[in-house]
Image (cartoon, rainbow, N blue to C red):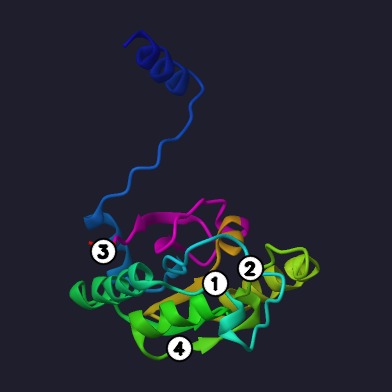
Amino acid sequence: MKIIKIFIFLLISLNVPLKAYSNENIQNILKDGGKIIFIRHAYAPGGGDPINFDISDCSTQRNLNEEGIVQSINIGNFFLKNDIKIDKILSSEWCRCKETAKYAFKKFETKNFLNSFFSQKFANNKNQQIKELKEYVQNWDSKKNLVLVTHYVIILEVTNSTVSSGEMVVTDKNFNVLAQQEISVN
């Protein structure tokens, strides 16, 4: 108990912000429209990509399992149930992102600026991708929301937020984080 009190004291004295977003909060923020919704692809077992990774061949990539498919469907249901208006759905070209977008929203476009740069093979693309992503968002104008189905590294780089599989981060056009929520499998 004493350790908990010390920890709380340190948090308060260091002025460390605690993220606390409610379900109702994220729904209200999204109903206003004009927001960017980063979604990390749903659950795909493992980490990174195999050495023989080929962007045009899903059999060489990590893909969604049953849990990931259910999680993707639940993501789509969250938007339907809460009547959240969407302008566009964009996805990374990686199969696990395309599968997430397909099961959640049915229709989507791919954009290479949403691709992962986690592996050394793609690390040199990072700066160009982030530049293109930011330009796209700055030029985007809608009263509805923009959905970006992508990877941990993209979301971390742009929003400074860590995310689990199937988690969303909602930002404004300046990438200020407004809300964050994980969509579960249940």
- Look at mark 4 in the image and give the residue it sits on: 108
Q: What kind of element bears circle 2?
A: loop
Q: Residue at x 78, y 69 (%)?
A: 121
Between the C-alphas of marks 2 and 1, the distance is 6 Å
- Say whether marks 1 and 3 touch (CB < 8 Å): no
Q: CA distance from mark 3 to mark 4?
A: 22 Å
**Mark 4 or mark 3, which is nearer the start of the sequence?**
3
Query: Residue at label 3?
Result: 27
- Residue type, mark 3 in image: Gln
Label placed on residue 62: 1
Please name the residue shown 68% across and 77% down the image: 53
The N terminus: image quadrant: top left
Element class at badge 3: helix
Circle 2: residue type = Asp
SS at circle 1: loop
Q: Earlier in the sequence, mark 2 or mark 1?
A: 2
